[in-house]
Amino acid sequence: MRIVTLIENTPGAPGCAHEHGLSLYIETGHHTLLLDTGATGAFADNAAALGLDLSRVDTVVLSHGHYDHAGGLLRLVELAPGAAVYMQRGAGRDFYHGDRYIGIDKAILGLPRLHLLDGDCRLDDELFLFAGITGRRFWPRSNLELRVAEPDGHLVQDDFSHEQCLVLSQNRQHILLSGCAHSGILNILDRYRELFGDDPDVVISGFHMKKADPYTDAEWQTIEETGRALQGYRHTRFFTGHCTGRPAQERLQEILGDRLRPLHSGEALDL
């Protein structure tokens, strides 16, 4: 299995752009797929610079309904018109950060190979999608700034029922991928255990701990307690970036050591 970070917030491989967004390129035994497509078409420019042929992509998984994960999706469909796109039905709603629209381009909803899901979905022996993450253990407080529009236009708290995770299974290795872990990484892992009865070998995810203002003591405590809880997943390795934020990531690395590694644009993951 091969996984390359096509785009992420931080620079990595020479000649590759970086932006506030996330896109992961994945080759399995039977698929070439993407989890998310970043905020713009820069992911495709990076793929070209890395010699990756996006016309081979057969599957696209959208982790949730925010622009920084779906912004390049229409470009991807131009490059790989045969690719099937999977998203939760609720990911097409109108999402806001304050007054700013942060949802997807509505043209995505008209794509001919779009599959709107209502919960979990097994695509085949290699690919499984799950949603239904209802736990609230260390739920990211930054979620409180994020809203979704009701049919009457009234904005309410986003509960992130539109978030889904991808599980890759190959050669007895199980890899869990999430875009931002808005539902909380520990709650996602609880849902994984509920479904699979074990822990993943690898987790690749943003942890949604990034913020512009200084962290409060309570926020640092939450980050540290999250890190100590992740220590309990003794055979699991973690890769994180994008919305985790460098200060939080560095604090987590102090706790988890080399079991936590950063994502950078254009770099392949050592799996």
Image (spheres, grey):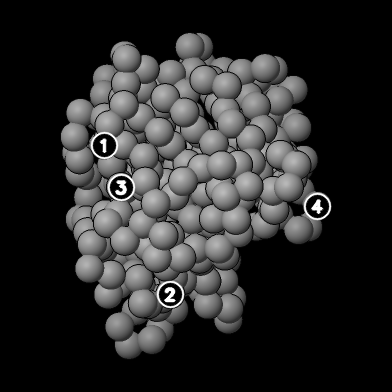
Nearer-N-terminus badge (3/2): 3
Looking at the rendered structure, which numbered label has been put on residue 58?
Answer: 3
Q: Position of residue 237 (x, y in %)?
A: 53, 20
Residue under the image location 56 percent in, 42 percent down: 51
| CA distance separating discs 1 and 2 | 25 Å
Q: Earlier in the sequence, mark 2 or mark 4?
A: 2
Give how far apart the Cα atoms at labels 3 and 1 are.
15 Å
Which residue is painted at 30% across and 54% down in the image? Answer: 83
Indicate the quadrant containing the N terminus: top left, top right, bottom left or bottom right: top left
Question: Which residue carries the number 1 mark?
Answer: 128
Kind of residue sitting beneath label 3: Asp
User: Could you say whether the residue bearing mark 3 is in a helix, strand or loop?
Assistant: loop
Mark identifier at residue 105? 2
Residue 189 visible here: no
Disc 4 crowd rating (10 Å Cα; few below 14, some 14-19, many 20+) is: few
- Residue 61, relative to residue 241: is it above or below? below
Q: Mark 1: which amino acid?
A: Phe
Q: Is residue 18 above or below residue 156?
A: above
Q: Percent x, y for residue 192?
A: 33, 30
Residue 73's tag is none
The amino acid at mark 2 is Asp
Side of 12 where 60 appears, left or right = left
- Tell me the CA gap for discs 2 and 4: 32 Å
